[in-house]
Structure formats: structure tokens, C-alpha cells
Image (spheres, rainbow, N blue to C red):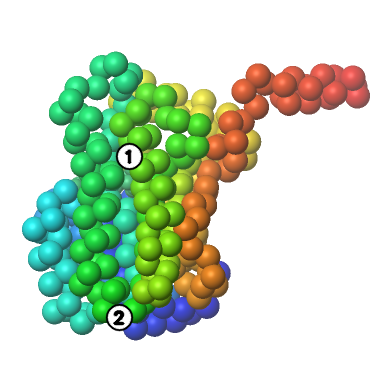
Amino acid sequence: MYQPNLFKDQVVLVTGGRSGIGYGIAKQFLELGAKVMICSRKEDLLKTAAEELSAFGECASYPCDIRKPETIQLLAEQINSVFGRLDILVNNAGGQFPSPAEMISEKGWSAVINNNLNGTFYVTLEMFKSFFSQQKSGVIVNITANVYRGFPGMAHTGAARAGVENLTKTLAQEWASFGVRVNAIAPGTIESSGLDTYAPEIQQQFEEGRKANLMGRFGSVEDISNAVMFYAGPMSSYISGTCLYVDGCEHLGNDRMGLLKTMRVAIAKNKK
Ligand SMILES: NC(=O)c1ccc[n+]([C@@H]2O[C@H](COP(=O)([O-])OP(=O)(O)OC[C@H]3O[C@@H](n4cnc5c(N)ncnc54)[C@H](OP(=O)(O)O)[C@@H]3O)[C@@H](O)[C@H]2O)c1
């Protein structure tokens, strides 16, 4: 789909690259010629993923918790010693749990905000200081979520992701003169390992969700990684501060009253 060697010799950091969407992004960068560093907390799983990914190109890994600035600094040092530079940062690491807002504890709220908002900022800031500001170039792609109409059942991550979307706009303007572009991708529901973490009753709900989507499916990991390649590459060289919804129209709200479906059924009946 993309030109082979599109990212030849470019160095990419994918946070949360050991699984799901992050793994798919790392794999596609490797297939297109990039050198990739992946990071996450679970050392064994991270190492195994990096070994697997090495079948597609030069892949390294370093254990790092994005909530801890001191470990992010070590990550930057590791990137510098292994690859000597960084061209592209994909902030993909994150996680949350479903809960009605009134039942979220202070600890639960802080955990999700720390991971999905603060962690993204800490990694971004460190990579800007260590690489992009000195190189006078860089691309940042933030993976958020479909929070366009709020996020009932996930108030904490809705707030965090909306924060990242706004941060994307701010940094795009503040860092344009450093040659740095910053964009975000908001995935709808994506068929990836992230979905496995939800309880069985929510898994059942996913079945309904697939049917309710106007395109009749959830997104694939490749739907997201293809969008990341676009933002990371020269095809989008004049685009910064934007957020692309990759969600099969989900953010537009779908046909909530079922009007379209009802009309179609009625028209089909009349035709008979
Ligand atoms: N799947 C979806 O439908 C969907 C929709 C919208 C947005 N998203 C977001 O897209 C991203 C990837 O999702 P996914 O489906 O691929 O989920 P996933 O398989 O659970 O991936 C999350 C990754 O982030 C890493 N991670 C989590 N917290 C971290 C931390 N504090 N420090 C470093 N690494 C951390 C995890 O590795 P460790 O456990 O080893 O740290 C894991 O590799 C997530 O941010 C997710 O919330 C997913």
C-alpha cells in the first residue's frame, strides 16, 4: 500500500508496542524500512514481542513505564545509544477500565489520567528535549480514542484523551518552528488485544456494537497503522495539529433513533 523503504533509516519509538495496535504500528514501520524501539512495562512480553518483530527489520526494546519521567529519560538514553537519533514518536501506550463516573475512586481516576494524559506528555517532552529540538525535525502521532461526544462509561479516559487532543493542537503550534509536526489519531473500537481486557458482558455488547456501526464492523489494527504511516510520512508534510477519527463514522453518532434502518426496511417491503 505504501512505497517500500518509505521510512528507510528513520528511527521510530512506539510506546506500548508489545501488543495490539502498537505492535501493528511497529510491524508496519519495520516493513517500510524504519528502525523501531518499542517500550512497555512487562519486560518478558516486551522482549518476546521485540524478538518476533525483528523478523521484519531492526527492532529494539526497553522496559519503561510512561508514568515515570526518570525511566523515560533512561529510554531516551537507550534510543540514543542504540540508534543515535529519533525521527518519529508514536504515543500509543495506554489503558483504562469501564465504570460509571460516580463509582470511579480517586485512585482509579488518577491512575487513568496519569497513564493516558500525563504519561503521553512526559514521553513527548523527553523526546522533544533529547532529540527533536536539537535535530530541528520530528513527527509525533498521538493515539487517543473516539471521545468526540464524551465517553459515557469511561469518564476518566474521555477526559484524558480530550486533553491529549488539545495538547496536540498546542504543541503543533509551539513546536512548528522546530520542524516538529504533531497530530492525533482517534480510533473507534478496534479488533485488538485491548478488547480482550473487558468483562464477558461487555464482550457481548461488542457484538451489538459491530452490527450498529454503519460500516458493519469494528476497525482493524491495520486501519490504525495505515493512518499512522500517513501522518508519519512526507504525504502529510503540511498537516499538523489535527485529529483524524478512524472509526467508521462512529464519532458522528450513528443512526441513534434507528430511522435509516426503519426506512430501508419499509422501502424494501413496499418494493415487494
Ligand atoms: N482497541 C481499541 O478499541 C482502542 C480504541 C481506542 C483507543 N485505544 C487505545 O489505543 C492504544 C492501544 O490499544 P490496544 O487495543 O492495542 O491495547 P493493549 O493491547 O492493551 O495495548 C496497550 C499497550 O500499552 C502498554 N502500556 C500500558 N500502560 C503503560 C505504561 N504506563 N507504560 C508503558 N506502557 C504501557 C501495554 O504494555 P504493558 O502492559 O507491558 O505496559 C500495552 O502494550 C491504547 O492506548 C488504547 O487505550 C484502543
Q: Position of residue 151 (x, y in %)?
A: 42, 30
Vertical arrangement, residue 268 with respect to residue 134, above or below: above
The front one of 54 and 179 is 179
Residue 55: image tag: none
What amino acid type is highlighted by mark number 2?
Gln
Residue 193 visible, this angle: no
Q: Position of residue 38 (x, y in %)?
A: 24, 63
**Residue that mark 1 sits on:** 160
Q: Where is residue 236 in the image (x, y as percent from the top left)?
A: 53, 69
The front one of 212 and 52 is 212
User: How packed is label 2: few (under 14 Cα within 10 Å), some, or many (20 or more)?
Assistant: some
Q: What residue is at 28 percent from the left and 45 percent from the top?
A: 117
Give me the C-alpha separation between circle 1 and circle 2: 29 Å
Question: On the picture, is 119 further left or further right than 167?
Answer: left
Question: On the picture, is 156 further left or further right than 6?
Answer: left
Q: Position of residue 2 (x, y in %)?
A: 53, 72
Q: What residue is at 46 percent from the left and 40 percent from the top?
A: 146
User: How packed is label 1: few (under 14 Cα within 10 Å), some, or many (20 or more)?
Assistant: many
Question: On the picture, is 258 further left or further right than 235?
Answer: right
Residue reaching furthest to the right: 271
Q: Which of marks 1 and 2 is nearer the N terminus?
A: 2
Vertical arrangement, residue 77 with respect to residue 119, above or below: below
Q: What residue is at 36 percent from the left and 74 percent from the top?
A: 178
Residue 135: image tag: 2
Residue 144 visible, this angle: yes
